[in-house]
């Protein structure tokens, strides 16, 4: 069995897949639980299995856990009811496929939004409480959030999609000349293209019959050549629907958060902060899927060994997350910043992968001459101070003494 890097929706449903159900600590972001499950199983079913069949094991391992935060895959009646039986509350986001969520987003009164973090705070999120809902048999508290910081990013995304849609529609229109043999068929085909437009509109539509001489060669001067209809030329202008894009952009910056914990006196800021704690597990998955952790091809025969491999990768993620905590705490304590990497802004709390990218970009070189003298080039002051802030032992492999005298214990103590 060959394990290669792939994507669950890359058009190969026949290939077996494995995914990781993970739990991370809300405060530190450290992964605390790992379970490998079939990647060919729906995420919702995997979460339900975790809360139903594995509930006893879950509560035994984490007896103090009262709240589980997750993405919209948690937002089903079965999962909420299973969580209730396991004496666990959920915080999640309602999917846009939910009609109530779409209604709250579309019909929200802009005047009722208030600054979640206070008007003096630089964070821009606004929110408003919505009526409580029933998800299955569970009542949930509902918060509608609006994040204006996403407006420009989402608008540009819709504009890119509209451009691609217009190009595709123009190609379809150009093919109608060859494929349509009568006016009714051409008009119906053009209408179909128009109905499929989601971000664009069709203007200045015209239909022109294309005729061609039936016989090859020059016709007689005294006789009108016989002609045949060879197609209908459809011309139109496809333009982005700016009004529709603006409307979709406004709706896209809103989302609905729900929680089954009705006993807590939630503020909008507390509930949003708790929901955003899922960024820790998301960052862990991102590290887990990093191609730098995968070999080009790994051959394993047993599913148990595949799961063991995933466990090793998850332990690597744990080590990286611990290193990231040490990195951020050390840099904050010493007021350090990591310089820009690949057009990114300087960072006072960088991710560990960004630090690795910075180290790689320095092209650090170790040179040892014939007499045994060791030199290390391109370890700049910034990198030296960052590793020193993390702890002197992080400098071991960037000091010439390590490769000359091998006095690791002495170096670590300096």
Image (cartoon, helix red, strand yellow):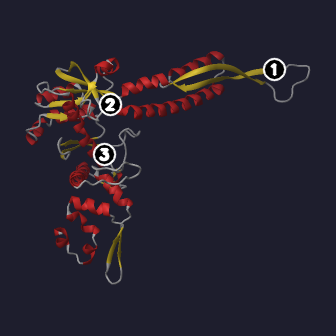
Residue at (20%, 75%) from the top-left corner? Answer: 407
Numbered circle sitting on residue 226: 1
Numbered circle sitting on residue 104: none
Q: Nearer the viewer, residue 65 or 396?
A: 396
For residue 272, above or below residue 405:
above
Q: Residue 130's spot in the image, x, y percent?
A: 24, 19
Q: Residue 143's spot in the image, x, y percent?
A: 24, 25
Say whether residue 162 is left or right of residue 19: right
For residue 351, above or below residue 116:
below
Q: Residue 316's spot in the image, x, y percent?
A: 24, 54
Numbered circle sitting on residue 286: 3
Q: Nearer the viewer, residue 381 or 404?
A: 381
The tag earlier along the polypeptide, 3 or 2, is: 2
Disc 3 + disc 2, Cβ < 8 Å: no
Q: In which quarter of the view is residue 167 placed? A: top right
Which of the two marks, 1 or 2, is nearer to us in this view?
2
Numbered circle sitting on residue 147: 2
| SS state under label 3 | helix
Residue at (35%, 83%) from the top-left corner? Answer: 370
Q: Residue 246's spot in the image, x, y percent?
A: 44, 25
Which of the two marks, 3 or 2, is nearer to us in this view?
2
Q: Of all residues shown, which one is farthest toward the right?
A: 222
For residue 367, above or below residue 98:
below
The tag earlier along the polypeptide, 3 or 1, is: 1
Q: Quadrant of the C terminus?
A: bottom left
Q: Would residue 144 be visible to someone looking at this image?
A: no
Q: Of all residues shown, which one is farthest toward the front?
A: 120
């Amino acid at each position: 069995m060959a394990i290669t890097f792939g994507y669950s929706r890359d058009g190969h449903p026949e290939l077996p897949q494995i995914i990781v159900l993970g739990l991370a600590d809300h405060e530190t972001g450290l992964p605390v639980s790992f379970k490998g499950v079939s990647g060919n199983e729906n995420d919702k079913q995997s979460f339900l299995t975790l809360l139903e069949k594995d509930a006893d094991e879950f509560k035994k391992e984490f007896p103090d856990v009262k709240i589980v935060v997750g993405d919209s895959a948690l937002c089903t009646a079965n999962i909420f009811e299973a969580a209730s039986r396991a004496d666990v509350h959920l915080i999640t986001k309602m999917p846009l496929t939910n009609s109530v969520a779409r209604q709250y987003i579309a019909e929200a009164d802009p005047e009722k939004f208030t600054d979640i973090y206070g008007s003096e705070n630089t964070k821009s999120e606004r929110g408003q409480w919505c009526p409580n809902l029933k998800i299955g048999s569970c009542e949930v508290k509902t918060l509608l959030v609006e994040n204006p910081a996403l407006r420009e990013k989402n608008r540009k995304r819709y504009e890119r999609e509209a451009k691609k849609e217009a190009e595709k529609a123009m190609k379809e229109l150009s093919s109608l000349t060859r494929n349509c043999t009568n006016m009714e068929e051409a008009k119906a085909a053009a209408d179909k293209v128009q109905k499929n437009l989601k971000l664009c509109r069709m203007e200045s539509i015209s239909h022109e019959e294309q005729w061609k001489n039936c016989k090859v060669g020059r016709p007689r001067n005294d006789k009108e050549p016989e002609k045949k209809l060879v197609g209908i030329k459809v011309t139109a202008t496809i333009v982005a629907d700016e009004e529709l894009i603006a409307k979709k952009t406004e709706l896209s910056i809103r989302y609905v958060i729900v929680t089954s914990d009705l006993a807590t006196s939630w503020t909008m800021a507390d509930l949003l902060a708790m929901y955003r704690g899922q960024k820790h597990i998301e960052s862990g998955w991102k590290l887990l899927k990093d191609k730098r952790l995968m070999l080009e091809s790994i051959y394993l025969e047993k599913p148990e060994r595949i799961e063991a491999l995933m466990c090793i990768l998850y332990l690597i993620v744990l080590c990286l997350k611990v290193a990231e905590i040490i990195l951020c705490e050390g840099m904050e304590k010493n007021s350090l910043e990591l310089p820009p990497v690949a057009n990114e802004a300087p960072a006072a709390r960088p991710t560990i992968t960004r630090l690795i990218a910075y180290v790689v970009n320095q092209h650090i070189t170790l040179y040892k001459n014939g007499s045994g003298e060791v030199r290390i080039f391109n370890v700049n002051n910034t990198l030296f101070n960052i590793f020193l802030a993390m702890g002197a032992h992080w400098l071991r492999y960037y000091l010439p003494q390590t490769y000359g005298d091998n006095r690791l214990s002495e170096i670590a103590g300096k």
